[in-house]
Amino acid sequence: MKIVLLDAITFGNTDLSCFNEFGEVEVFDSTEASLTNVRVKEAEVIVTNKVVITREHMQNAKKLKLICVAATGTNNVDLKAAKELGIAVKNVAGYSTDSVIQHTFSMLFYLIGHSRYYDEVVKNGEYSKSGIFTDVSHPFFEIKGKKWGIIGLGEIGRGVANIAKCFGAEVCYYSTSGVNRTEDFQRMNLDELLKSCDIISIHAPLNDKTKNLLDYEQLLICKEGAVVLNLGRGGIINEAAVAKVVDEKNIFFGLDVFEKEPLPLEGPLLHVKNKSRLYMTPHIAWTSVEARDKLIAGVCENIKSSLTENK
């Protein structure tokens, strides 16, 4: 069996040796669209994270039996074509839940604690020269007693909710699907949540219901001093609106995902004036060492189960 990994750079230094038990393994750090056809031509199994696999690629790969998506979402594969051509498509779910939950709080603490300012004021010597043992110029608040709104109460959203509750926050949620997920937390409509919450975190998928869910008008109704975190998908928050609101109102944003990745240099988010109100990370919430290990183990398990199914 020939297995081709098309964008292994996204796995970092994760051990990929489990693939060797299945046969010949060809690993590419990244694959441009123009190279996909030639690289998958002899493959029986394709492993892709973000590389798009089209009908043309499948038809070109005459031996192809299985496409393993090294992620939860399968929107980079033409699923209709795969079904028609008898090619199995398998993804991996749940591998990064704990990692994303942890990064949610990491982003929150960085923003509400003014970590960038306080780190710099010590390192640049200003604190040493101040003659005062403390610096209270950038006040921070406690999570206890604050209202935390969660947009998208799936597995990750529920995990964040439970930890926020442990901190003493009052948790509520908005259901992007319209389904009442739980009676453990108060369900609210979107406007009510935005107006009343001190912290808002997004853990929803991108679809027709969530595209530009938070646009300029919605962001303006958020409370003064509110913190808005997007760890769902880029495109749920309008990025141009974020860039505008950051410079107009005292609202803090933490973004780990973007509509186009990597973030374009000409994008509005890289040109805001009030940079201290905007904390951005390069889609890393899912990438803990443990999460990547689970992901690769899940992909290899999918290959193994596919072999068993085809016996």
Image: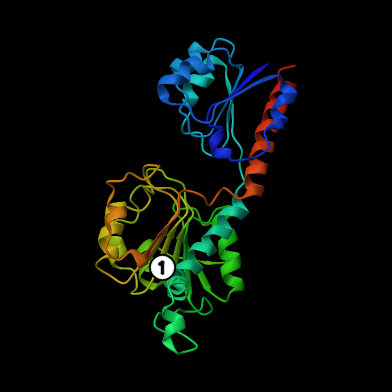
Residue 271 place in picture, x, y as percent: 27, 56
Q: Which colour assignment does the render follow? A: rainbow
Amino acid type at circle 1 is: Val
For the question of whether residue 138 can be seen, the reply is yes
Q: Quadrant of residue 277?
A: bottom left
Q: Give above or below for 154 relative to 58.
A: below
Q: Residue furthest top?
A: 62
Q: Residue at x 57, y 16 (%)?
A: 86
Residue 50 is left or right of residue 89, and the answer is: left
Residue 265 place in picture, x, y as percent: 31, 46
Q: Give above or below for 263 relative to 41.
A: below
Quadrant position of the N terminus in the picture: top right
Residue 182 is left or right of residue 112, and the answer is: right
Total residue callouts: 1
Residue 32 is left or right of residue 47, and the answer is: left
The residue that mark 1 highlights is 227
Quadrant position of the C terminus in the picture: top right
For the question of whether residue 182 can be seen, the reply is no
The residue nearer to you, when weighing 94 against 17, is: 17
Q: Quadrant of residue 292?
A: top right
The residue nearer to you, when weighing 66 against 152, is: 66
Q: Residue at x 54, y 67 (%)?
A: 185
Q: Residues within 10 Å of mark 1 (few under 14, many from 20)?
A: many
Residue 81 place in picture, x, y as percent: 48, 20
Q: Secondary structure at mark 1?
A: strand
Q: Residue furthest bottom?
A: 132
Residue 5 is left or right of residue 266, and the answer is: right
Q: Residue at x 43, y 26 (%)?
A: 32
The residue nearer to you, when weighing 170 against 6, is: 6
Residue 4 place in picture, x, y as percent: 59, 22
